Amino acid sequence: MRGPVALVGSQLLGQLALVAVIPVLTRVYLPAELGIYQFAFAIAFIALPLATLRLEYIVPTTHSAALVQRRLRLGTIVVLGISVLVLATGVIDKLNGLTEVADILLMTGLLIPALGLPLLDSARLVRLGARRALAVRNLVGGVAGASLQAVFALGGGDVMLLPVALLLGRILGIIASRMVDDPGAPTSALAVTTAGGQTADARDERYTLARAIPTIGAGALSGLTIQGLTVIAGATVGPAAAGQVGIAQRVSSTPISLVGQALAQTTQLSFSRIIREQRPALTASLAVHVKVFLVLGVALGIALAIGGPLLAVPVLGPEWAPAGTLIAILALPAALQVAVSPTDFLFVMLRRERRLLALQASRATLTWTAGLVTAAVTSDLALVVLAFSIAWAVAYVMSLVFVFAAARSFDREHADADRGAAAPAVIFASMTGDYPNIGDAIIRREALEWVSGLGPVHTYVGRAPDAWIDQIGAAELGPVYHRGAGSKEWMRALVVAKRPVLLFEPGEVQLESRHAVRELVFLAVIVLVKVKRGTVVYAPRAVARPGVLPLLLFRLGARAADVVPMRNRESLALVGGSIRSPDIAFGREGIPTGQAGPRDTLVVSLRGKRRAHSAEWIEAVRSFAEARGLRIVAAAQVRDDEDRAAELARALGAEDFGWRAIPELSQEHRLMMLYARARLVISDRLHVLVLATIQGAKPLELVDAPSGKVDSHFSWVGIDDVSVDSTGMDVAALTSALAAAAGRPAPPLTQALDRARADVAEVRRLARGRIKAVLARTTTAREFADR
């Protein structure tokens, strides 16, 4: 399952299960019994905003992962605390003989965490962009909750067990979501600490009482509107009427129950990214979502209006005939609810909490006044529901007007900010890559540092997930653009910019024949920048698998560019006009590791696609480590290598240092700490060996038929004999190669790294100088200070 379809589909199946169980409940329990459950559900729903503090709206746009954790922890504590308080009150009332009140309180106490904990978990997953995990949670939570309700009902269980079943089902859904390995966002936890130990983000505003009170109040008023009809019916007519209205509302809200949570999650995934990246594209995105939701809502509303009266008795049972008429009356607000409800959270994300509070107060006043006045005048349940429904529909239309006004205000604000900040020249960076791949992310972060502080940076990241954007630090520098509509926005901004600066990502450029179109597009963009008297800078690159036409196009682009560093001898010879540079990763300082401990580790990190090593290779590595008292650790710096790491761990009797659910930035920090304890690191990945060498480990590529990539890049900086072809070697020869690498003297390595670091710094100085010269020609009021 992928994307929004997976979310909607899983929510549909999960909620269909909860709808399918209604006929079971209506045949087992009397209207008065279900009326008490519906009354408790209404109270829990109204209390829900206070229980979660509406943090489910705040978390998705929070930048700092540590702050996300704290907010989720606070929300969980409050949900459980209020639940315990309500349950304790119910127990006391039970002991004092207030049976009916006690039953309502006990069910309310169980329903609060059943509703609140999934909301907080959704916020966590939306923040991660974890669509697959969301889909699994929606499906498992709905199916498990419905199944348990059916089991308890058919087993002769008391109606009090219904909230227990719902709570258990939601907990199972949350547990299932945490077991999902989500390739779109592999971090299922949020305990992210950056390599530098920074966990705060200046872009995050405090969620103060001034924001929380109107947000919580608006949520409570929204619940009061949605559940008001059940409360009015129960208070004015009695529990049986509350049961009829409650079931009618439950059926008529089937559209929003089936797909509402998934629609809200879809819009949150889309809108939260636009808001975090501060792109003036919110109104357009909102319009697209509302149009689609409105079509869906109208179709489902028609189905309810026709099917409600026809199917009430056959499906629910003869006692529930009045509910069929009520379902038809509620079809109009139900249709509008599908279109409007998934957008309400925007007010909180845009910090328009007071406006949302005023809107929800107007909604509640309008609907409750209509319902209570009609009840006082007529005492006719159908007329009460009709008056309430008309007022409810008007309130939804009013909400739609206000939410579009808020979105347009956001777009104007950030369009103006872009115009004010973008001055005459803007920096554009292309930072696509292989993700999740820690080495690729690090070298792109190093490249973006070349333009840090020089002006707003518009970064194109292709299909990258949010975790990649966090890794490379793109959002801190300016707007971030994704494939599709984002690529068009990026190009449009580049076209209108005066004297733009274009920075290409570092790394290996594949130039097979199939990449000819891509290189032609890049050439056209480079020519455009040069025509506009801008500058083009490449971060250190290498050419691989050159085909005739793609190489020709690449060379034409490189000749037009201003700074073209090549990171190995072969590429420098192929690309005319280029300059010599080590790989950009060699310019990186070792991450401070504190008391890392003794160098007592041998690290093995190999490509997942490489065929398994020989028994001799395994024996040599194992015996070499044992003889020198080294622990063996099988690590993965690229997600695709995780299975190979596990396989090597089993074969070598080593520790498996895979990723699992660890966030990328945390895995990066773990790896640097690991390399700081390593005496020897064996890998066929260039950046594993470069980063390990920077951390003080001895590098070795010991594999059959090495590609030459590691050897060419290390010899380029004066470190020879890193790569050894192990083809046909016996245990003795392999052990000798391991001993030679581990015994390599440290001073020559340190000297070579110092020279490489200085060379990369010189290329950086040259690149920043060219960029600053372009910016200086068009900007006189601004100073550009180098770091």
Image (spheres, rainbow, N blue to C red):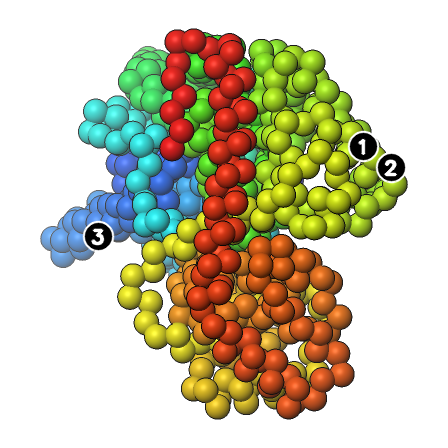
Inter-mark Cα distance, 2 to 3: 70 Å
Residue closer to the observer: 738 or 311:
738
Mark 3 lies on residue: 84
Question: Badge 2: few (under 14), some or many (20 or more) residues near its Cα, within 10 Å?
Answer: some
| Mark 3 secondary-structure assignment | helix
For marks 2 and 3 on the same chain, the one whose residue lies earlier in the sequence: 3
Left or right: 224, with 682 as reference point: left
Query: Callout 1: helix, strand or loop?
Result: helix
Mark 2 secondary-structure assignment: helix
Establish if 775 lies above or below 162. Answer: above
The kind of residue on which mark 3 rests is Val
User: Nearer the observer, disc 2 or disc 3?
Assistant: 2
Of residues 450 and 78, the one nearer the viewer is 450
N-terminal-most mark, 3 or 1: 3
Q: Which mark is residue 321?
A: none
Q: Position of residue 133 (x, y in %)?
A: 53, 51
Q: Nearer the viewer, mark 3 or mark 1?
A: 1
Residue 172's place in the image compared with 365, above or below, is below
Residue 553 bears which disc, if any? 1
Which residue is tagged 2?
549
Residue 324: give x, y in percent of width and height: 54, 31
